[in-house]
Image (spheres, coloured by chain):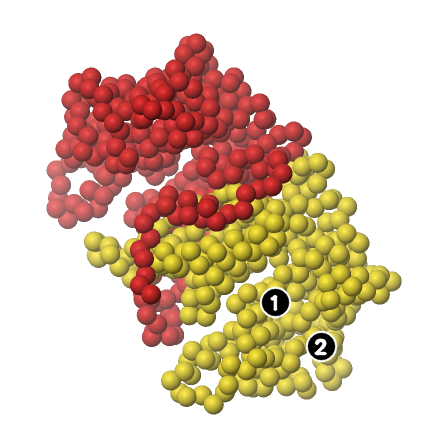
Chain colours: A red, B yellow
Amino acid sequence: MSATKIPGEFFLINRLQAKLIQPKEKESIIGIGDDCAVLQGTQGNYLLVTTDMLIEDVHFSRLYSSFQQIGQKALIVNISDIAAMGGKPKFAFISLALPPSLSLEDFDELSQGITEIAEKYSISIVGGDTNAGPDYLNSSSKDEPLKGQYSGLVINITLLGEIQPKNIITRRSACQGDLIILTGHVGDSAAGLDLLNFIKNSSANKSTVDFKKNIYQQAIKRHQVPIIRLAESQIISQNHLATAMIDVSDGVAGDLRHICQQSEVGAVLWCEHIPISKAVQDIARLFHKPPLSYGLSGGEDYELLFTCPPDRIDEAKSLIKQGTGTPMSIIGEITQKEKGVRLIDFQGHSILAPESGFDHFQSDNA
Amino acid sequence: MSATKIPGEFFLINRLQAKLIQPKEKESIIGIGDDCAVLQGTQGNYLLVTTDMLIEDVHFSRLYSSFQQIGQKALIVNISDIAAMGGKPKFAFISLALPPSLSLEDFDELSQGITEIAEKYSISIVGGDTNAGPDYLNSSSKDEPLKGQYSGLVINITLLGEIQPKNIITRRSACQGDLIILTGHVGDSAAGLDLLNFIKNSSANKSTVDFKKNIYQQAIKRHQVPIIRLAESQIISQNHLATAMIDVSDGVAGDLRHICQQSEVGAVLWCEHIPISKAVQDIARLFHKPPLSYGLSGGEDYELLFTCPPDRIDEAKSLIKQGTGTPMSIIGEITQKEKGVRLIDFQGHSILAPESGFDHFQSDNA
């Protein structure tokens, strides 16, 4: 039998999901397909559960981040999933595969990063599983096929949160006419990662670029330790300002598509309104890329993307600004399903948003 | 700064735990230190949460188990943690790191194994995170230190279960005078693993041992797909037959020690009463090991070890036998803390149980 190469993450999730028995009774309110699973919780609340696995050299690199930053990020990406539904994080479970190359000092740094974030957001770490990873270097049997000398750090965090049923925000209820809102600005994390890659590869070349520049460091920091929009999320959910919400982890276009699929609607994104920082513009110029490509398809921004009825926009803006100081941008509008997900480019042309990848996308902003 | 090598799993758990903020309020009933974390659940029940990470070439090998068996085992070890507290498993979250060496057929086998067990025990899989592992083989940058050509499959499962508060069984309430009970028999999994190792290493040597022998295959099967004592656990918890319980994953002596530490008691184990199968005796003879070493320190048996007041023993035996057909053995007695954990060997001598490792332990049963 010839082996088939695995086609991709979303394919696998669908394939696994197709095999699953569906939850009986009313116990699981939402299963796979939103930021968190939603189950019955205590005292009339819903229980939110999310799980994320971070794998060395896939999701992070010890060349680019300290172990403290890696620990912080591992918990933050889970908090962001709870925030995306309007919930409050409460209990965390940490599983670790620790490779032989990790020292005790590294481990302490890693756990310091995790516990710092847990403390800041009042999350109790109540369980976990700590394991030594395979030690191929010191293995006595060298005769096995495919064995190398390295195994990486793997961090899996499961985070439990809660929310009152009346406040929950799913991906399912965006309506035609709703405006599409984004907190903060996007593209910084992907631009920071490009910089980190460039710095690594050009260190010997005596590059003339001043990487210590404050504006560059901001983008790099944003990649290393993402922002957390938990306070913004609480305001949005408690004031019922959103009809649908998601955290931006795969780029604005891709994540908006998730909302459209689940809500059975279309959308139009106004490119000139997508908030791009000065840092992203500078880095884009350095690498001859359109700045918008970072925001549309960059990933790991962890800003909140939500849909809001037009008559609630002013209230949303002022409540979030007052409560957190975070700016909000109106970047598009929900349309009918048949129209698909479209972009209005800088020339005012309406084009169909590609399924994935926006690197070819051209703008006047470059 | 010189790097310190990591000393061991229990050390790390303690070190991480020391850094943690303790849960406030009455929301976390039990945190780290039992088979599951215990939180407030729905309708007056407790929520049980356990998480286990299985790492290729640490916890399993694709040379020894099919991917279907690996999937089955990954869920079973979590079910066993829920069973160890008397609970019922309900919701599972599956995170996967899939190495490039895994084909689509392997993935399908793996998920078939997981879903088979989920279906059999009415567990809903409601979330997860599917990731491609690092592809060092096809990596374009070969210049990084410590990189090899291989990364393994990692499976992390978080399992949620529930139990009525009056039925929960922790590790904390064993009392002096309680008898120590074990379901089934122990050592088979470790003996099966020894056989698998031997078969792999001796295949070229034209060994005269008939590995196809039914009795050997039983032990191998037990290593590949552990038994699940969920029905037994339900009977024990619903009839309040146990003062403390644990599932045997690290060998009888080690797991009894966990009960003794948490309950602040001592214990005496009667070696000649520890149930060892014919398979383990045969395999022990083959490898010139004392059979009891497999049961005392072998690991991965997933039998239930519990403490029971003497006046409930007859009831416990008959209820479990009637309900499940599973035999039970009385293997020792809880003593006062000061006596520590002791073994009565086959000559009737009382010796202090070593902290870990029983391979040097001698018996007349060999």
Earlier residue among tags 2 and 1: 2
Which quadrant of the figure contains the C terminus of chain A?
top left
If the image is split into quadrants, where does the N terminus of chain A sit?
Answer: bottom left
Residue A348's spot in the image, x, y percent?
Answer: 20, 17
In the image, residue B221 lies at what x, y percent? Answer: 55, 71
Q: Which mark is residue B271?
A: 2
Please identify the residue farthest to the front as the structure is shown.
A338
- Return the chain for callout 1: B
Pick the front one: B49 or B75: B75
Quarter residue A337 falls in: top left
Name the kind of residue labelled 1 in the image.
Asp
Front residue of this view, candidates B64 and A128:
B64
Q: Residue at x 80, y 61 (%)?
A: B319
Looking at the image, which residue is at 42% across and 45% down? A13
Depth check, mark 2 against mark 1: the one in front is 1
Q: Is residue A14 left or right of residue B136?
A: right
Q: Does residue B117 lie above or below A147 as drawn?
A: above
> Tag 1's secondary structure?
loop
Residue on which the image places disc 1: B301
Report which quarter residue A163 is drawn in: top right
| Residue A192 locus on image (x, y percent) | 27, 36
Q: Position of residue B214 (x, y in %)?
A: 57, 79
Task: Classify 10 Å Cα crowding around label 1: few (below 14), some (14-19), many (20 and above).
Answer: many
Instruction: Work out whether B309 lies above or below A248.
Output: below
- Mark number displayed over residue B86: none
